[in-house]
Amino acid sequence: MRLRSGQVALYLVLVLVAVTVLALGNVGIFLAVRAKNHAMNAGDAAALAAARRQAELLNEIGRLNLRHAEADYVGDWERSREIVREQRRIAFLGPLDCVRAANEAALANGAAPSGEFSQILLTHAADVASKYVQYPALYPEPWEGAWDEYAAALRAVAAGGLAAGPDNAEFLDAVECFPLTSKSFYAMIEGESWCKLVVAGLTGLLEMDLQNLPQPVYGETAAVVNSEICSLHLETRALLLDPDELGDFRALLSRNGASFPEGDPVDDDRAPDDPSRIYFFYNVSDWCEWSPQIKAANLPISGTIKPEFDVKGCASVFRVIENVPQLLSGTSRRSYWNAAAKPFGTIEASSSRSIVTDQEAYGMVLPAFEAVRLVPLALADPGDLSTADTAWLSHVRDHVPRLFTAGAGGLDGSCRYCASLAKWNDPDFRAKAAAWVAANEETCRRGSGGSGPSGGTSYAR
């Protein structure tokens, strides 16, 4: 009888342990799902808030373009110069307000401040205050004293921690060049996913060791117009139109908010390169149609895109991090979400409302933005620098340049990306990959996209 009682007790203990493990597992799943939902809500809200601020900045620059045209009409060249100076400050410093707006939205949606995001901006502020100031030929100032102002603004934004980090920053000292600064290349090595090389038409890289791979070229930077963070992707150029074009152009400006006095305009005797002639336009390499890129990325988007939404350009991409406790192990893991949003709008053209980049406006920025939308990451991120990822940014900015002088010997043993490059530098590893490609190349097909684990689509990583 005692033996039977002992068996029952053991059985009950085993059942109790199983029930406890099951309960903890269910709670763990609940916590993981809740963390992902928090991250999604906070990330989406952050991207939308930043995009709304981008729309406000674009509208303000557009309104100043109109005021500039009015000043030019009456010959107030000094007022025109003042407007250009004001626009430069808005385009360069204004987007830092996008980070503040994103942070407030993320906090309001339950995200916790991350010292990691703040440290990225603080480190960059130190670089700006030293490197940018020290090498003016490489990093020309938008105006005298701009780098000091910018560094101070970065420190102010980072103060107190950030709950959302800008993930499509375009730091001037972080040069982009496939493959060494492309995350997809490292993922390809780690997963031995050689079909990606085949689809991209880059199997020739398998014949190259680190010393021969295409490497970034650090050279002179063009005149700086846009902020490195939440860039508006604008450019400046003189407005030089034929007299026959000016009438129609002023009519378009009038339809979009300009007010010109009665009578003829003042004779324009300014030199072609006079600073007062500068207006702000969309950078045509960034502000273009989305349709070709959507087709190339094979994104799972059906139906016809309305013309006003078929406009690529400035976007806000933000990342939030949520720590998920692992009850069984007593540790935690990170759940993160990347989200992207951008502003959209239309202008009043001669016949009807049209896209903001309508040729009738010569690509000039006008106060036209009235909507923001979430967009796929693959269509919003201008590159692969992932500037809210500390480890990756450190690799791109510190480890990759070291390869120039030290080669494979300069790889950092504690860096996972350096470990991938060391793996690549093994001739036997590349020979094995080449053999796989030779045997399976014909079976490689492009996927159909779909939802990715960190937001956007699978083509966003």
Image (tube, helix red, strand yellow):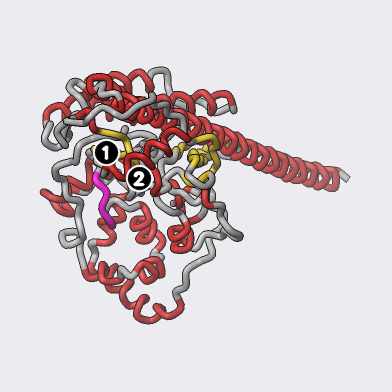
Numbered-mark total: 2
Closer to us: 288 or 293: 288
- Is 17 magenta? The answer is no
The numbered mark at residue 356 is none
Q: Secondary structure at mark 1?
A: loop
> In the image, is residue 436 above or below residue 148?
below
Instruction: Tell whether 460 sits left or right of 7.
Output: left
Residue 269 lies left or right of residue 318; in this view the side is left
Write the residue at 51% across / 23% down: 104
213 up-or-down from 273: above or below: below
* Marks 2,1: beta carbons within 8 A: yes
Residue 9 vs residue 26: left or right? Answer: right
* Few, some or many residues within 10 Å of mark 1 (<14, 14–19, 20+): some
Q: CA distance from mark 2 to mark 1?
A: 9 Å
**Numbered range of the magenta stretch:** 175-179
- Image check: 178 left or right of 163? left
Q: Residue furthest right?
A: 1
Counting from the top left corner in percent of width and height, residue 116 is at 39, 30
Say if residue 118 shows up in the picture: no
Badge 1 amino acid: Leu
Pointer 2 or 1: first along the chain: 1
Q: Which residue is mark 1?
A: 239
Q: Which residue lies under the disc numbered 2?
A: 362
> Magenta stretch mostly in which secondary structure?
loop
Quarter of the picture holding the N terminus: top right
Q: Residue at x 48, y 46 (%)?
A: 355
Identify whether 154 is placed above or below 358.
above
Spot occupied by residue 182 in the image (x, y as percentages of width and height): 32, 53
For the residue marked with disc 2, what is the amino acid? Tyr
Which residue is at a point 28% across and 19% down the rendered structure image?
Answer: 152
